[in-house]
Image: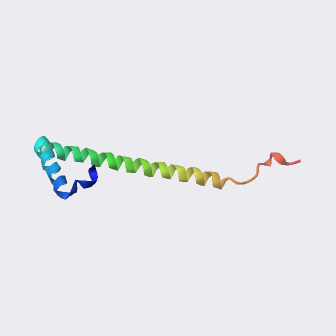
Amino acid sequence: MLNNIGLPGLLLIAVVVLVLFGRGKISSLMGEVGKGITSFKKGVNEGAAELEEEAAEAAKDVTPKETDKV
């Protein structure tokens, strides 16, 4: 269904949205979307960094415990 929209259809949709909501409302909405995307990327990067730190900590401590001495 959405495969046949094309450029003229997208332009028509953009004009209708602009008329209905106005430039100011769309501008503020896009600003919020941009903040959300930035926040999401920051969270993903922090999560990846945390996983890398945990893997590095696990790889650091490979010495055997000294409780096995006889």
In terms of depth relative to the viewer, which is nearer, 29 or 42? 29
Residue at 44 percent across and 52 percent down: it is: 45
Number of numbered discs on residues = 0
Q: Position of residue 3 (x, y in %)?
A: 28, 54
Q: Residue furthest left?
A: 19
Farthest residue toward the bottom? 7
In the picture as drawn, the residue positioned furthest to the right comes out as 70
- Which colour assignment does the render follow? rainbow
Q: Position of residue 43 (x, y in %)?
A: 42, 47
Does 9 sit left or right of 41 as displayed? left
Occupied quadrant, residue 11 = bottom left
For image coordinates 24% across by 47% down, the residue present is 31
Image position of 14 (left or right of 3)? left
Left or right of 39? Residue 15 is left
Q: Position of residue 67 (x, y in %)?
A: 81, 45
Q: For this rendering, which residue is in front, 10 or 53?
A: 10
Q: Position of residue 40 (x, y in %)?
A: 38, 47
Residue at the spot 22% in from the left edge and 53% down from the top edge: 5
Q: Residue at x 83, y 47 (%)?
A: 68
Between 22 and 1, the one lying in front of the other is 1
Q: Is residue 41 left or right of residue 17?
A: right
